[in-house]
Image (tube, grey):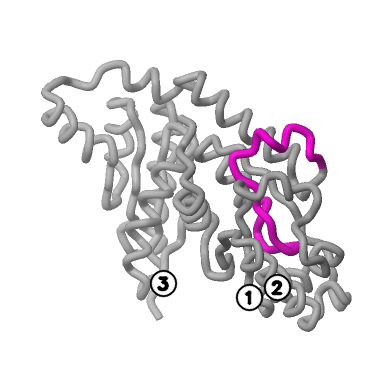
Amino acid sequence: MSSPRHVFYISDRTGLTAENIGEALLNQFGNLSFKRHTHPFVDTPEKARAVVEKVNRSRQENGQRPIAFVSVVNDEIREVIKQADAFHINFFETFLGLLEKELNTEAVAAEQGHHSIGNTKRYDARMEAVNFSLNHDDGVSDKNLQEADVILMGVSRSGKTPTCLYLALQYGIRAANYPLIPDDLESTDLPRMVKPYKDKLFGLTIQPERLQAIRQERRPNSTYAKIDTCRSEVADAQSMFRRHGIPFANTTDKSVEELAVHILQACKLKRKF
């Protein structure tokens, strides 16, 4: 089996843009293996030269030309990075010229906006949504629950918390979540805390076998992690969702990104910024 191809994500900010687009492209080559290196905040020529050295060293040691996904605004820094012995995909150079042509104007002040918080209203909306989700995690409080955009319900370890936080951070959605405990599952009614907000409820379910594996890591050899417990709780939760007409999704094979989009569409929610 050939050695993995080295991939470098190089950015003058967090690197998330380069990683997200780069991963989407690399995922189309499932028959190949890659070794990833992320270098965020490469915002000076000195830092860029240091990264170039690492890329070139990888080329020498691995024998294959690395792939470099680059998300850097500054022209001087980009020119330094181009000196690396790699196959370069530079997102700004690839797309900015096309946009300038279509908009019939040159890009200006892009660097300033790229390096700052930018739209403070957008940033504040994200932070407010994250704080809301943290304050309403696992049903710890019903204070201001009426302000939630969506309330996720599901058995313990079905993916509620990461999905809520992703919805908050990426879309500014105020997402609360409520864990279904045995007393809730034994009842034919909705839990008291969330019953007044039925129209905001969305259920998460999961395959019992996957749930058992997750719970086993958290509480090994406990009743909580037994397969019979998992099967019973999942079945009861799904019965509750169907009984009360609550839309739900299976988290077993879905990424948090896919779940978030599914919830937005099912609940007809819109990005807050």
Where is residue 6 shown, x and y percent of the image? 40, 59
Q: Amino acid at mark 2?
A: Val
Query: Dot 3 surroundings within 10 Å: few (below 14), some, or many (20 or more)?
Result: few
Residue at 56% x, 27% y is 125
At which x and y percent is residue 19?
Answer: 43, 48
Pick whichever, 148 or 58, lies toward us.
148
Please name the residue that numbered disc 1 is placed on: 207
State the residue in front, 34 or 145. 145
Q: Nearer the viewer, mark 1 or mark 3?
A: 1
For numbered disc 3, what is the local secondary structure?
Answer: loop
Q: Is residue 242 above or below residue 164?
A: below
Circle 2 Cα neighbour tier, 10 Å, few/some/many (<14 / 14–19 / ≥20) = many
The residue that appears at 17% across and 32% down in the rendered structure is 97
**Residue at the disc numbered 2:** 234
Numbered disc 1: secondary structure: loop
Q: Residue at x 64, y 38 (%)?
A: 148
* 271 relative to 195 in the view: left or right: left
Residue at 52% across, 60% down: 255
Residue 206: give x, y in percent of width and height. Answer: 63, 70
Q: Which residue is disc 3 drawn over? A: 3
In the rendered image, the vertical position of residue 158 relative to residue 131, given as above or below: below
Q: CA distance from mark 1 to mark 3?
A: 35 Å
Q: Secondary structure at mark 2?
A: helix
Q: Amino acid at mark 1?
A: Gln
Q: Say which amino acid is labelled 3.
A: Ser
Rounded to the nearest angstrom, the CA distance separating label 2 from label 1 is 8 Å
Do residues under tags 2 and 1 come within 8 Å of each other at their CB atoms?
Answer: yes
Q: Please check the rendered image and state whether residue 150 is part of the magenta-colored stretch, yes or no.
A: yes
Q: Can residue 257 be spotted in the picture?
A: no
- Give left or right: position of 57 versus 232: left
Q: Which residues are magenta?
A: 141-161
